[in-house]
Image (spheres, rainbow, N blue to C red):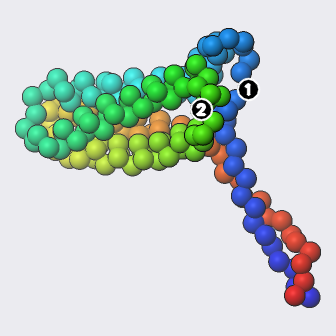
């Protein structure tokens, strides 16, 4: 007789699908949450990174164009997730798993932003605006990792089953 261990994976969302605390169209409590503050900090870092690179005369066109596209696209997506949570759109569009969408957004954003920041740092040639843009890109990458960890938690639980062979 042998016992088998079964691993159960439980997922919980902490930023989306949260029960609203205030009635009406707008969740007035959401802007005071940690997730909302984190999203605003991410958007601000991405905007600063974009502006640092955009307002600097740079030499390598393709490397910094990639960085600009990544920073501005992900800034827009972060603002969209902020609006989704602020106006409780996740309650109306139940066909989308908002916690999973946010997790995938953060995973893709972190990877592409990290690549863009590394390329921008390598190709900056000591130009102050480009260096500052890549530093804010690295800060935004770190904030995206924090957002990914805080927005979606995966718990592995090992349970013993009474099955015998």
Evaluate whether residue 149 shows in this view.
no
Q: Is residue 22 above or below residue 94?
A: above
Instruction: Give the secondary structure at mark 1.
Output: loop
Label disc, if present, on residue 93 of the rendered structure: 2
Looking at the rendered structure, the number of numbered marks drawn on it comes to 2
Kindly report the distance in space between the C-alpha atoms of the residues bearing marks 2 and 1. Answer: 15 Å
Q: Quadrant of residue 67?
A: top left
Q: For this view, does 142 lie left or right of residue 90?
A: left
Residue in view at x 70 percent, y 29 percent: 18
Q: For this view, does 162 lie left or right of residue 56?
A: right
Could you say where residue 165 lies in the image, as x and y percent from the top left? 87, 87
Could you say where residue 41 lies in the image, as x and y percent from the top left? 46, 25
| Disc 1 packing (10 Å; few <14; some 14–19; many ≥20) | few
Could you say where residue 56 lies in the image, as x and y percent from the top left? 14, 26
Label disc, if present, on residue 139 of the rendered structure: none
Image quadrant holding the N terminus, namely bottom right
Q: Quadrant of residue 110?
A: top left
Name the residue that disc number 1 marks: 19
Q: Return the disc, 2 or 1, that comes first in the chain's sequence.
A: 1
Instruction: Give the secondary structure at mark 2.
Output: loop
Q: Is residue 140 above or below residue 155?
A: above
Q: In the depicted view, which residue is nearer to us: 96 or 139? A: 96
Residue in view at x 27 percent, y 28 percent: 50
Residue in view at x 86 percent, y 70 percent: 160
Q: Quadrant of residue 84?
A: top right
Q: Find out whether the residues at labels 2 and 1 contact each other: C-beta distance under 8 Å.
A: no
| Disc 2 packing (10 Å; few <14; some 14–19; many ≥20) | few
Residue in view at x 67 percent, y 40 percent: 13
| For discs 2 and 1, the disc positioned in front in the rendered view | 2
Could you say where residue 148 lies in the image, as x and y percent from the top left? 54, 42
């Amino acid at each position: 007789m042998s016992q088998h261990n079964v691993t159960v994976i439980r997922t919980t969302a902490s930023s989306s699908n949260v029960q609203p605390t205030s009635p009406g169209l707008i969740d007035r409590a959401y802007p005071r949450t940690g997730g909302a503050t984190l999203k605003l900090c991410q958007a601000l870092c991405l905007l600063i990174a974009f502006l640092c690179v955009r307002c600097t005369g740079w030499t390598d066109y393709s490397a910094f164009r990639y960085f600009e596209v990544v920073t501005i696209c992900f800034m827009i997506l972060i603002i969209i997730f902020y609006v989704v949570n602020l106006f409780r759109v996740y309650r109306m569009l139940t066909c989308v798993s908002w916690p999973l969408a946010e997790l995938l957004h953060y995973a893709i954003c972190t990877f592409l932003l990290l690549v863009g920041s590394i390329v921008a740092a390598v190709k900056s040639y000591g130009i102050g605006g480009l260096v500052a843009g890549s530093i804010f890109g690295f800060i935004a990458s770190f904030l995206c990792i924090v957002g990914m960890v805080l927005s979606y938690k995966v718990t592995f639980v090992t349970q013993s089953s009474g099955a015998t062979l």
